[in-house]
Image (cartoon, rainbow, N blue to C red):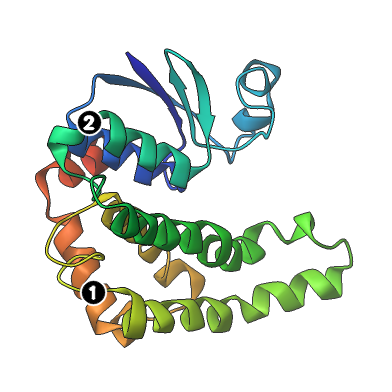
Amino acid sequence: MLKLFHSPGSCSLASLIALEEAGADYEVVRMSTGAGDQRKAEYLAINSKGRVPALVTARGVLTETPAILAFVALTHPNACLAPIDDPFAFARCQAFNSYLCSTVHVAHAHKHRGYRWADDPAALAEMTRKVPETEAACFQLIEEEMLAGPWVLGEAYSVCDGYLFTLADWLEDDGVDPKAFPKVYDHRERVRARPAVRKVLAEQAA
């Protein structure tokens, strides 16, 4: 059985959605990053990066959302969560998820975790101030060039969709109006309506 270390409200939601969509045999270890669970010795022994998600598999621990999403898709081919038979299309899937991980999530992180890059209070305040601008620029690019429609990669739902949903659901709290991006907003609400996503969100809120 797979074991996912997950903190509600974090990017690990994307991995949880993928596991549920795949019909995987998994269990969830609920953590609180706000309470610092990711820095406790017990978790650091599993993931020395001190971040979520971490997925414990029969072969070892996987970290980083794009890697976990690819693993879920590849190990559950019947769920059709990625174009695994087409190397170019699968690379496009990876490129999109990598952009979310390396750029969009980092833009968001400047609001709450500026301490990773600076100590000066003025610098931290400036990073926080700029989050709505930088995050909106990311989603404008997704809106105009990266969201094929109706799903990220086109006609088929994929692991990219749950990941985009996860990050798009942070927009309001980051001071960005999601309705400024009609395609992204419509996509977010259609993902939210999926049975697997409704189940995960209900369990997360419990």
Identity, as a three-letter code, of the amino acid under mark 1: Ala
Estimate the x, y position of residue 75 in percent, counting from the top left: 28, 29
Estimate the x, y position of residue 16 in percent, counting from the top left: 33, 37
Where 194 sits versus 54, above or below? below
**SS at badge 2:** loop
Q: Left or right? Give the position of 112 relative to 19.
A: right
Q: Image point 50% across, 70% down: which residue?
A: 174
Q: Which residue is mark 1?
A: 148
Q: Nearer the viewer, residue 100 or 204?
A: 100
Mark 2 vs mark 1, CA separation in Å: 24 Å
Q: Which residue is mark 2?
A: 76
Identity, as a three-letter code, of the amino acid under mark 2: His
Q: Left or right? Give the position of 76 relative to 38.
A: left
Where 204 sits versus 1, above or below? below
Q: How many dots with numbers?
A: 2
Q: Left or right? Give the position of 148 relative to 166.
A: left
